[in-house]
Image (cartoon, rainbow, N blue to C red):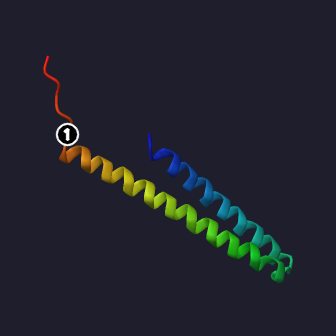
């Protein structure tokens, strides 16, 4: 559960970046190219950050699973 927040925020940032690209497409469709490029740069950075958070969350989960397999918890004796 520790890595789910990181993964959720990665998906949210990725979606927000895609919404920025949609706004850029709308601007370019209406011939507002000069107004579109700052939003495009912002969208690239937000999308890139979201993808990075997703990669980190997945890698952390895989490392935790590998750690659990290599060093299983000691069984309690009753």
Residue 59 is drawn in which quadrant?
bottom left
Residue 41 is drawn in which quadrant?
bottom right
Q: Is residue 27 above or below residue 69?
A: below
Q: Residue at x 16, y 28 (%)?
A: 75
- Quarter of the picture containing the N terminus is top left
Give the residue number, with chain letter if any, for mark 1.
72
Q: How many marks?
A: 1
- Secondary structure under tag 1 reads loop
Question: Looking at the picture, how far across and down is residue 65, in whole percent?
Answer: 29, 47
Q: Is residue 75 above or below residue 53?
A: above
Horizontal side of residue 64 vs 58, given as left or right: left
Horizontal side of residue 66 vs 12, given as left or right: left
Q: Residue at x 85, y 79 (%)?
A: 32
Q: Residue at x 37, y 50 (%)?
A: 61
In this view, the residue in front, 62 or 24, is 62
Horizontal side of residue 13 vs 61, given as left or right: right
Q: Residue at x 57, y 68 (%)?
A: 48
Question: Looking at the picture, how far across and down is residue 18, in whole percent?
Answer: 66, 64
Furthest toward the bottom, the residue is 34
Q: Is residue 24 above or below residue 52?
A: below
Question: Looking at the picture, how far across and down is residue 11, in whole percent?
Answer: 57, 54
In this view, the residue in front, 64 or 12, is 64
Horizontal side of residue 58 vs 33, given as left or right: left
């Amino acid at each position: 559960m520790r890595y789910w927040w990181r993964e959720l925020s990665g998906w949210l940032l990725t979606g927000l970046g895609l919404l920025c690209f949609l706004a850029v497409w709308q601007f370019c469709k209406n011939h507002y190219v000069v107004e579109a490029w700052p939003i495009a740069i912002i969208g690239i950075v937000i999308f890139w950050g979201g993808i990075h958070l997703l990669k980190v969350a997945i890698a952390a989960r895989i490392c935790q699973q590998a750690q659990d397999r290599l060093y299983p918890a000691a069984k309690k004796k009753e």
